[in-house]
Amino acid sequence: MLTKFRLPASLEEKPEHYIPILQAIRFAEAAQRSQGITDIGFQAARRLQFCHLSEKLRASIRFSPTLFIALQQLCKWAPLEDTTVSVWLERNDNHVRICSKLAGAACIPHLEHSQWLQNVVVMHIVRQFAGLHWVPETMAFEARHEPSLETRSFWENTRFISDQDSSWIDIPVSFLDLPNRASETQAASLDDGIVPSGHEIVSAVKLMLPSYLDERIPTLAEIAEMAGISIRSFQRKLSSAGVTYSDLLDGVRFENAAKLLRDTNSKIIDVAFSSGYADPAHFTRAFRRFSGITPREFRGKWKPQ
């Protein structure tokens, strides 16, 4: 049957290899009909885990300080997971839609088999920040697809809609500044025994940088020297972890500012200076880029807790 649909007959021996998605969709639909399987795309999606994502995407998510940044990283690196897919964010009232679409597939029937995977992959990324049992309030399919009653029983609190311009799930805007659940994401990413190249150096730099934020921040060359490696090796290790030195520095600045806003009564201008920003307006713009809200709004949200 795999051969009939021009797919490699030894797929199980090549779990890391790419295959043409449109042939895979046609194969899935034929398999569903011939074997009497219900919602084969959903059945496949149920087996997905965070560790099934590519090493580079896992690393970029794991080193994102907030969900907002993680979703931006997903939009950037999605083509590494599927070379025909694009991912973007849309604001819809008090929710954000995480949308995905396959290029050149608008007229292909039974796209729901792939769209289940697209939506559930995104769900696993959100769970690294929102908790391992989070499910979206709404899941949408570009295809005309009505999940079976059996499938719906697994998603009792989720509303399904179809025939949309793209596939998407929604999350509350209030989730955007959720911090990374470091211990859980670390465990999830190491379940398969894969440790991304550059992990140790990134962890070391994240420990070193906070000491310099309110002074002169080290250059890339200086931080490489502190880490005891060449500039070229340092850049290569950061690249393998899916980050740049600028990304790393911005993340450390944000984490420092967020901690001060949550745990102290320091004035916002002092938080800016302590986080390495000479211009408070620049600080506000940078903070908003990470969390989706201003430092003052962030403090208002966290202080009552």
Image (tube, rainbow, N blue to C red):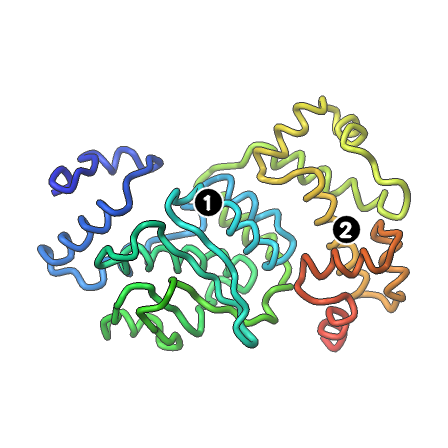
Q: Which residue is mark 2?
A: 253
What residue appears at the point 77 percent right and 70 percent down from the top-left corner?
299
The amino acid type, in three-letter code, at marker 2 is Arg
On residue 273, the disc is none
Image vertical order of residue 234 relative to residue 47, above or below: above
Q: Quadrant of residue 153?
A: bottom left
Viewer-side label of 1, 2: 2
Image vertical order of residue 73 relative to residue 120, above or below: above
Q: Quadrant of residue 208?
A: top right
Quadrant (top left/top right/bottom left/bottom right) for the C terminus: bottom right
Q: CA distance from mark 1 to mark 2?
A: 30 Å
The amino acid type, in three-letter code, at marker 1 is Asp
**Mark 1 falls on what kind of element?**
loop
Q: Which residue is mark 1?
A: 191
What residue appears at the point 79 percent right and 70 percent down from the top-left corner?
296
Tell me the crowding category of disc 1: few under 14, some 14 to 19, or many 20 or more residues within 10 angstroms, Cα based.
Answer: few
Whether residue 256 sits left or right of residue 77 in the image: it is: right
